[in-house]
Structure formats: C-alpha cells, structure tokens
Amino acid sequence: MNFSDLNLHSALNRAVKAEGYVQPTPIQELAIPHVLNGRDVLGCAQTGTGKTAAFALPVLHRMLNEPQKGKRRYIRVLALAPTRELAIQIGSSFSAYSKFTDLCGTVIYGGVNQNPQVKALQRGIDILVATPGRLLDLIGQGYVNLGRVETFILDEADRMLDMGFIHDIKQIAKRIPTKRQTLLFSATVAPRIQELATEMLDRPEEVSTAPSATTVEGIEQSIVMVERPGKIDLLIRLIQRENIGRTLVFSRTKHGADKIVHKLSKASISASAIHGNKSQNNRQAALAAFKRGKVHVLVATDIASRGLDIDDVTHVINFDIPHEPEAYVHRIGRTGRAGAHGIAISFCSAEERKDLHSIQSLINQRLPIHAGSGQEVGHIEEAPVFTPLEIRKPAKRSGQNSTGSARRRSRRHRRKPVSVRP
Ligand code: AMP
C-alpha cells in the first residue's frame, strides 16, 4: 500500500512526502481508514511504529475537510500524553504534518512557566497537545475551553495509568462533548486499558501491531550476563569501541542514571542524564545536545524516555533489565526506528534472570546470550566474540600505533551481527 491509496488531503500527502515517508507503516495502514471514517479506535502499538502519524494524519484530514465554524479558532483536537517529552514529540509531528495547511496548535506541559502556553492558548489554536496535570491546572484557571473538541486522543494510555493519571483523564473527559471521536493508543491492552476503553470509547475499532513484530524487525538483540559491579566497566569498554554510534543507555533508577553519567564522564565519554528529577529545561537541553551529536550517550529512565524520537540511535543498552517486560519493548524501540537497523544489548545479572525470562515470554523469543554468559566479567573479556559486543579494551588511538595483530583481531570482531529473527 502507498500513502496515495489512503486518499488523504493533498496538503497532507505533500507533508508526508516532505517527511520522506513512502509507505504507511502497519499501524497506519490499519488505523487511518477507521479514523477517516470517524470511528473510535483502540490501537495497540508502541512508540516507534509510526503510531503518531496513524492518528495525526487522518485527524488533520478530517479537520481540513470540515473547516471550523466561525472566525475565531477553537480547540478541535485534544491529545493527551503522559510525559512532557512525548507531548512535545506529538506536537512536532502535528506541526510537520500540517505544515502546508493553516491549522495551528500548541503543546502544554508542567515544569515550565505557564505564561507562553497561556499566550498561545489566547491567540487561538485548533490542536492542543497536553500532559494531564498542566492541562487541568490551566482549565482551573479558565484558560482552556474544551467545549468544542471534536477528537480526543489518549496516547500511551497504559503509561498514563501507570503514572496515576486516571482521575485526571476522567476529569478532562468530562469537559469534552460526549459526541466526539475518541482514539486511544496503548502499548499493551491489559484489562485496565479495556476498562478505560469501555468507559471512553464508543464501539471502537481495535487495531494492533504485536510487540513481537516490532521488537524483532530491524533490531539485533542480545544479552550479556554480567554481575552488577562489572556493568559500568563493560559499558565504558563497549562505548569506547570506535564504531559504536549514538547510544541510549537505560537505567532503572534516577540515581543509577546519574551515577552512570558520572562514571562515563570520568572515562571521557560525553554523557547526559534525562530523568524526572531534572528540570524540563535541563532535559530539553540534554536531548538537543544528544540530537546534535554533542553528547554521545544519553542515559535515561523509563518514564523520561517515553516518546523520545531521536533519529539514528544505533545502540540501546539496558544497563538494568526492567522489571516490567513491556518496558523492554519500549526501550529497544528507541533504536531501529521505522525499519532502520539498530542494536539492543541488555546487561543481565544473576538476580535479573527472572525479569529476563518475563521479557522473553512477552516477545515470544529467546534472546541470544553473549558468549561468556554466566561467567565473571574477567572471563567475558576473554570470551569468543559475539559481534554486537566487542568488550576488549579499545584499540589504541592515533599516535599509539596498534599492532597488526590487534588490527586483525579488531577486524575479526567486527563480523556482521548474528541475526536474531525467530
Ligand atoms: P512514532 O511511532 O509515531 O513515534 O514514529 C516513529 C518514527 O517513525 C518517527 O521518526 C516518524 O517520523 C517515523 N515514521 C512514521 N511513519 C512513517 C512512515 N510511514 N515511513 C517512514 N517513517 C515513518
């Protein structure tokens, strides 16, 4: 299927072309026709599958085909997202897809001064993307009127529930007309999501892309068994490898993320952390530096990482194995986006084996374990190499001539990664 088969408004087809998209992704193929028909949709898809365009393009199409009533702009579309980063990401997708139209929107989220957001609202907008807390805050102050919203989008609904936003979502929904289109996207359709869907959606069409498909395609996954104290050294050696690119490291805790950044910096690796204890400006600056290539490694916690859309992340490294298996799918989805090739490596200590097992059950796949598994770190260093990992000490830099045998060894270690498709 091509985008032209979806019969989208010409201004949107132009934008899609400008973004370099040729074919719709599976979730787009499935969801777009239903959204165009005005149906409610319950979508099961992870970030990285193209789900933002799956709802944004048809929503924009409907807005263009049915222009607003009256002269003054009013909020016709409200999209809720769990985190500031995801909200910003959705906002920039809406603005990319609507750039050849006169529709306009804004993004509101907490942790920053509200005045610019209030000003944008007062100027008048068609599309509002928001995190629930700040939105309720501004509603309470009388700056937001949702009385004419036509489409209500809940993105990453599972994460919103995890973060305790259920009450806020219900409060917000009460302010939107009941005659509306509602689109709910979630990485998993657990019973509590079904419950929310029953409450919020009207006879929804259900569309889904299975997590196993999204994790596998384009991403080389592997596990290294390594005890906790050896993880940081292993990480440093891995990153110092000449051909390792832009790397996202996941830590389960904020404190852990800071510690990793500290150790990497001491090893002269430029790294920044992005997590909930950092101010919004700080997080944005870290993200911008990473995107520009000024920072080589971004160390993130799960919540902070949601919705991050960074091109060309070559490696995702799970410094810890997440407790929630779904988080694994989200984490590795940061690389290999929209079909690009990526590498995901997970460090697993003995006490994390149970979590690894849950991940393998969820994705219905056995992940290859790096040779040397179950050994001490020292042994892993000596182990025969499974390519995504070269855990020897990095080759000496210029001026410190490497020997011919070191070069040969290094070439040998750069064999093509083993395919891990099931
Ligand atoms: P999302 O899942 O919405 O976060 O999208 C993930 C990435 O895929 C973003 O960088 C999008 O720009 C990109 N993308 C979305 N749809 C397509 C498509 N049809 N073809 C190529 N890239 C896409």
Image (cartoon, grey):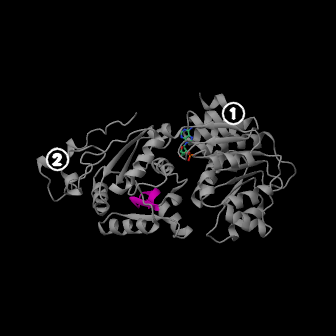
Mark 1 vs ligand 1: CB below 8 Å: no
| Magenta region, residue range | 289-300
Residue identified by numbered label 1: 33
Give the amino acid at mark 1. Pro
Give the amino acid at mark 2. Arg
- Tell me, yes or no, if residue 349 can be seen here: no
> In x, y percent, where is residue 11?
69, 39
The quadrant of the image that shows the N terminus is top right
Assess whether mark 1 and mark 2 are in contact (beta carbons under 8 angstroms). Answer: no
Please give left or right for residue 264 compared with residue 310 in the image.
Answer: left
For label 2, the SS is helix
> In x, y percent, where is residue 357?
41, 46
The verdict on residue 341 being magenta is: no
- Tell me, yes or no, if residue 329 can be seen here: yes
Q: Quadrant of residue 89?
A: bottom right
Which callout, 2 or 1, points to the residue nearer the camera?
1
In the image, residue 160 sits, relative to residue 110, either above or below, namely above
